[in-house]
Image: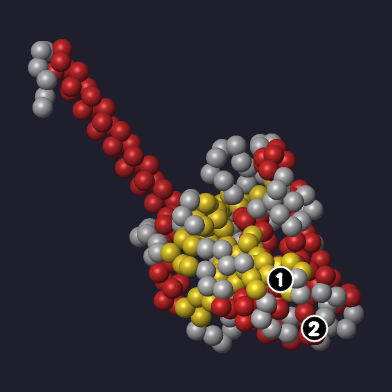
Amino acid sequence: MSFKEFKEEYKKLQTEEERKNFIKKRIESLLKNSEPKRIGKEMCGSYKDFISPNIGVCSNTSDIFADMKMDDLNIYQEFMNYIHNDVDKYMYGEPITINVIQYFIWNYFGYNAGAVFERMDIYSNGRPVSIKELKGKNIAACSERSAMVQNLLKFLGFDSEIIFGKLNGNESHAYIVFKPEKANIRILYDPMNPVEYLENGEKKYCAGVSRMSEEQYTELQNGGTYNFNYDLVKKIFVKNNECVEDKRVYTSDEIKFKKDMPVEDKLKQIKAEYIKVMENNANVIEDTVLDNEQGGIKR
């Protein structure tokens, strides 16, 4: 089901019961063929499907942090209620839909991820974290916000993927890339980092979106960098107002994009290569010690 088809089908519904049944069947279709797995940093470079409740989203590779589960299936009903079921007004096109999604995730999680210690406390309890535990607490970061956006986009029929990589070279980061219908471009959308602008002296925020060519997308897939461009966000949201143009350089997780084998096999290969290096180092040390004991030193 495409975004256009979703809107056409939803507009036909007349009663609340019909809408609820539609959403239920839509979720059931997305959950079909979903296999238990982990996604996230060093698990995969990207994930293109709906993130079901049996998939763990890894926000941090540290053993201290548990996986997060997208197990709040009320989100999709909440989103449609948030727009008052008025798809003509709030989803007449892809740009306005993305901006509405941005405001919805703020409404769900809170505006920032400032409560760092509370976040660590929730994630270090030794069990999977429900996304419901993050609701309204201002502790959801890029992985949780991007996971929710990925599911909302898939629910609405978008061709999207959540990408795990880095921002500005050193900050682990998750973000979204989606392909607009009937277009030969991609859009990078960073739910964690909206764009700040001034309108009549008042500070406002809009979704952080940037136009990406297919060539730039391929370069990103191959381990290259992508520089955020503000032209699109200025055109559709900021218009004649001033906006803050921070430098944003995005990269992807090279584990996905530099592999010739499944991720699990690649990780096994990396581990085997590491063990081999350590064994070689141990042999060199052992030979050196033996030579020293025999009165000779290798050079």
Residue 151, position as x, y percentages in the image: 66, 65
Q: Residue at coordinates 48% horizontally, 51% vertically from top-left?
A: 170
Q: What element carries label 1?
A: strand
Q: In which quarter of the image is residue 236?
A: bottom right
Residue at the image point whose x is 42% and y is 55% from the top: 255
Left or right of residue 211: residue 103: right
Q: Which of 107 and 45 is in front in this view?
A: 107
Residue, disc 2: 89
State the quadrant of the N terminus. Answer: bottom right
The location of residue 97, given as percent across then percent down, is: 71, 76
Position of residue 136 measured from the top left corner of the image (x, y, whole percent)? 79, 53
The relative height of residue 17 versus residue 271 in the rendered view (above or below) is: below
Task: Decide if residue 207 is on the left or right side of residue 48.
Answer: right
Q: Where residue 114 sits: x, y (%)? A: 70, 48
Between 69 and 242, the residue placed more toward the observer is: 242
Secondary structure type for disc 2: helix
Q: Which of marks 2 and 1 is nearer the N terminus?
A: 2
